[in-house]
């Protein structure tokens, strides 16, 4: 009998998860159903309870429910505990399990581009949920040092404090936009600026070898400035596929190949 999966969020129409999971399933010879669930903003918990009580197997969680999903889980992976956000849910022995696959999705996408993460220095612009989710997987991938710059410095400082408590010996610090300078191997834009059509200005004295924009399918002033510097760039579709593959492998025990889907 085919198992039921879904992605839950609000809004949800834009989600590409169903097409990705159906494509993985076809490639791997697995039968499944994967739908979109629009949960009311005050109705997330009722909606997931309803899904699992009707025999649903796994859920992906997207904006704005990842933190609520984290709070509902009785069993969490270490990366989900550190991220304090969950994008993958499943029921096992009557307990709700949660994981966060966004960070591994980013790492796999960057590895797929053959950009070296080991011993690298990374600058992340933005200090929201996505940044929180990717730091531990980046450190596990061998990144040496991460600097976080954010429009609201206090938010970056809070994030750094939290993660320093959670990850021993991590080389992580927050800086203000005014102090943005220096040399980095990779700069990751983890702001939502391109989603809202805002521009992001990188100072001339900021030097880097690679540029990754987490958003995808939108004009990005961040990527425009990186391209002027004539360096390799990527937008976040690979990360999206990577996180979906990671969820798929948790649920099905088999891993589709990223290169087949980007
Ligand atoms: P959040 O809303 O949690 O955080 C947004 C961040 O962007 C904050 O740091 C905010 O700064 C900053 N920001 C917003 N507008 C501007 C601006 N005009 N100038 C400078 N900084 C700005 O969002 P998420 O962390 O969840 O998502 C961030 C991005 O990552 C989005 O584009 C999202 O689509 C993308 N993403 C992509 C994924 C993928 O699979 N490819 C997965 C997850 C996220 P401040 O604190 O000052 O408000």
Image (cartoon, rainbow, N blue to C red):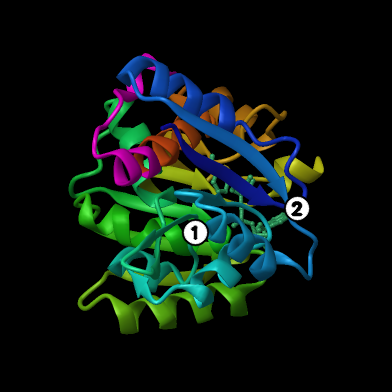
Q: Position of residue 201 (x, y in %)?
A: 68, 45
The residue identified by callout 2 is 10
Q: Which comes before the other along the chain, label 2 or label 1? A: 2
* Label 1 packing within 10 angstroms: few (<14), some (14-19), many (20+): many
Q: Does the magenta stretch include residue 260?
A: yes
Q: Which residue is drawn at 68% across and 60% down?
A: 64
Q: Residue 131 carries which label?
A: 1
Look at the picture and state if 228 lies above or below 111.
above
Quadrant for residue 80, please give it: bottom left
The span shown in magenta is 247-262
Q: Position of residue 99 (x, y in %)?
A: 38, 59
Q: Does the magenta stretch include residue 14?
A: no
Does the beta carbon at disc 1 come under 8 Å from ligand 1? yes
Q: On the rendered structure, is 157 left or right of 147? A: right
Look at the picture and state if 258 lies above or below 151.
above
Quadrant location of the N terminus in the rendered image: top left
Q: How far apart are marks 2 and 1 (CA)?
A: 21 Å
């Amino acid at each position: 009998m085919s198992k039921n999966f879904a992605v839950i969020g609000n809004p949800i129409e834009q989600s590409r998860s169903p097409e990705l999971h159906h494509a993985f399933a076809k490639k791997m010879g697995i039968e499944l159903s994967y739908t979109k669930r629009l949960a009311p903003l005050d109705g997330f918990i009722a909606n997931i309870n309803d899904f699992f009580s009707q025999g649903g197997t796994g859920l992906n969680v997207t904006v704005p429910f990842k933190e609520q999903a984290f709070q509902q889980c009785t069993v969490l992976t270490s990366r989900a505990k550190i991220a304090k956000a969950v994008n993958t849910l499943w029921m096992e022995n009557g307990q709700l399990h949660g994981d966060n696959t966004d960070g591994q999705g980013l790492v796999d996408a960057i590895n797929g581009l053959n950009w070296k993460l080991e011993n690298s220095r990374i600058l992340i612009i933005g200090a929201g949920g996505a940044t929180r989710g990717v730091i531990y997987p980046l450190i596990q991938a061998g990144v040496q040092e991460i600097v976080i710059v954010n429009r609201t410095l206090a938010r970056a400082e809070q994030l750094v404090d939290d993660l320093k408590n959670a990850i021993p010996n991590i080389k992580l610090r927050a800086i203000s936009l005014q102090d943005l300078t220096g040399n980095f191997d990779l700069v990751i834009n983890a702001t939502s600026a391109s989603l809202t059509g805002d521009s992001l200005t990188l100072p001339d004295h900021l030097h880097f070898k690679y540029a990754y924009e987490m958003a995808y399918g939108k004009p990005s002033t961040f990527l425009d400035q990186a391209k002027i510097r004539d360096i390799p760039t990527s937008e976040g579709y690979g990360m999206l596929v990577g996180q979906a593959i990671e969820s798929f492998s948790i649920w099905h025990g088999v891993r589709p190949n990223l290169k087949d889907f980007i």
